[in-house]
Image (cartoon, rainbow, N blue to C red):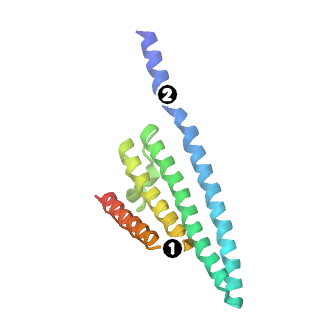
Amino acid sequence: MIVRELFERFLWSSRLSVMVGVLSCIIAAFVVFAMGLKDVVHMLQLIWGYVFSGSHAIRNDLVMVVVEILDTFLLGSVLLIFAFGLYELFISNLGEASKSEAGGKILIISSIDSLKSKLGKVILMMLIIKVFSFFSEMKPTTSLDLLYMGVTVVLIAWSLKLSKD
């Protein structure tokens, strides 16, 4: 009986090892946000160059950098949502989140499925941004290329509709 109780206590306490993943995700999110900040500084430099030159090439670079910035900050958000979800599922509810107006909107994670759903929606947005980035660089040469682009847009719209249900 004592051995079983000790084992169960050890087993229950082992859930705290999830903190390694939580802390790692938070650190990774901060690193990704710093990368995004570096991209914002680069964007400001491009804006400065575009204002004075009006170069179409700089404008195209500027659009791509903005897309990369969106993608970078979304990735940081994924890491934070994952960290919050792991913490709430395995450790404890976030008391500070219940006091915050925003906490109730993003941090209602009651199961692995709800965490996967939240992450899936953010990852879907990241993929949409990547497709937009690809389309902005793509120069369709045939009608088949245009058809593929149209089908891709329809599939993206359909996936967005499915993610809202």
Residue 143 sits in which quadrant?
Answer: bottom left
Assign the C terminus to one quadrant of the image: bottom left
Q: Residue at x 48, y 52 (%)?
A: 81
Q: Residue at x 45, y 46 (%)?
A: 85
Q: Is residue 59 left or right of residue 151?
A: right
x then y, percent, for residue 114: 36, 48
Q: Residue at x 43, y 16 (%)?
A: 5
Mark 1 lies on a secondary structure that is: loop
Disc 2 residue type? Ser
x then y, percent, for residue 103: 42, 57
Mark 2 lies on a secondary structure that is: helix
Residue 101 sits in which quadrant?
Answer: bottom left
Disc 1 residue type? Pro
- Give the foreground label among 2 and 1: 1
Q: Is residue 63 left or right of residue 93?
A: right
Q: Is residue 49 left or right of residue 11?
A: right
The answer to whether residue 159 shows anywhere in this view is yes
Mark 2 or mark 1: name the one nearer the start of the chain: 2
**Mark sitting on residue 51:** none
127 is higher (above) or lower (below) than 5: below
**Mark sitting on residue 140:** 1
**Mark sitting on residue 13:** 2
- Separation of residues labelled 2 and 1 (CA atoms): 57 Å
Residue placed most toward the observer, 152 or 107: 152
Mark 1 closeness class: few <14, some 14–19, many ≥20 residues within 10 Å:
few
Residue 155 sits in which quadrant?
Answer: bottom left
